[in-house]
Amino acid sequence: RKLIAAGDSPQGQAPRFDLGGKVAVGVKVYRPLGEDKDYSVTATADAKGLSLLMADFPYPVTADSGKIVIGGDFVDIHGLNLSSPTGAGLTLNGSANRAADGSYHPIITLTNAALPIDALLLSALGDEAEQLLTDLGVSGLASVKGEVFQKAGMDEPDLKLDVTLSGGRATPYKGRVTFNDIKGTFALSAGDLTDLSLQSKYGDTEIGIAGSVDWSGPNDSTTADLEFSCDNIKLAEELIDVLPPDSELRGQLTELFEQYEPEGTLDALIIWQPKPGDTPDGFRAQLVPEALALNLLGGRMSFTEMSGKVLVFSDLMQLDDLAGTFNDADGSTGKLRAQGDIGFDDEPRIGLSLDADVNRIG
């Protein structure tokens, strides 16, 4: 697998990395007294200066200190302190014992791990994980602890890591929305990301993100169950950029923005469940507007002192006891209450019940 760290060097190329290196090795040969006795050989290597690259996780690292002990049927790692070309650092301890079939089953513990989330790390992750994090435009610093292991009967190594993210930033799909100051935690395995709990900022608005991502489906397909929450966010068409460019939902929401041109502030809870292939994404949102302006009833209307909520699904928007003090373009004022549905079919369908108390007619 290629090594890429675009942007980490002045030329945008991967930093130079040479495998191998010279190490000091002590060899102990033990032969019991007596005839026809088997002897054993144990080699202990001072790993300082050794450059490593794992086949299943091609992330280049160089040992700053630590020892590797190799015996006839085992490999032990003691205090192996590693650093990467782009500033990562971590410590490994563990062992790999040879099974009856000749294979080795490693159990490696990671501690003191601080990994920059950059192109070098994403390329090492590879496949769906690399694509997802690249699409989301994620950067930051990940502090990691946990285990990498392979038990008997497992075709590939697995991992169970607890990750703490700090100083994060994300610009999904290279769009107009950037989330700053991302911090939080999640659990990572070879096939999924769970227990996601992140906080970030969009402008002056605090954003909460929770949920899980799974890329272990058929043909390594990816599914997710993500929840976004925020208070007092400014309603803007650019927010649609957080959805994939080819998402059907993104097209539907774009049409709604173009038709109603909504502006205002609101509290929001959004649940997004992207699906693989042609399966429609799951989507639902609860919006509690505080102030709102939109094209309605043939004109432009502004609402303040609002109550109620708007429920948005992939094919339907429901107004649930939505009410507010209105001012329209001709100077009319009063109180408007709305209940009903707006469908997102090829031809938009509207089934609303409107009730108004008019204070002044312009």
Image: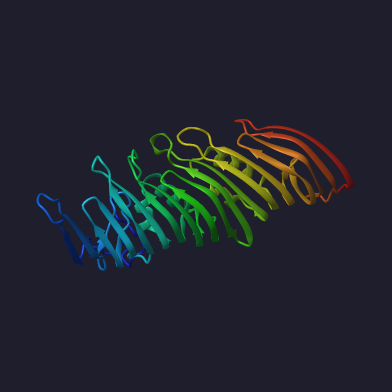
Compared with 178, 356 (above or below) is: above
> Residue 151: x percent and y percent?
35, 43
> Front-most of 107 and 29?
29
**Hey, which residue is sitting farthest right in the picture?**
359
Compared with 234, 23 (above or below) is: below
> Residue 112: x percent and y percent?
42, 64
Quadrant of the image occupied by residue 100: top left
Whether residue 14 is visible, yes or no, is no
Residue at 56%, 55% (x, y): give it. Answer: 198
86 displayed left or right of 162: left
Compared with 29, 307 (above or below) is: above
> Residue 131: x percent and y percent?
41, 47
201 displayed left or right of 162: right
**Hey, which residue is sitting farthest left in the picture?**
35
> Front-most of 263 and 271?
271
> Residue 166: x percent and y percent?
51, 62
> Front-most of 339 and 170?
170
Residue at 50%, 57% (x, y): give it. Answer: 170
Q: Which colour assignment does the render follow?
A: rainbow
> Front-most of 357 and 124?
124
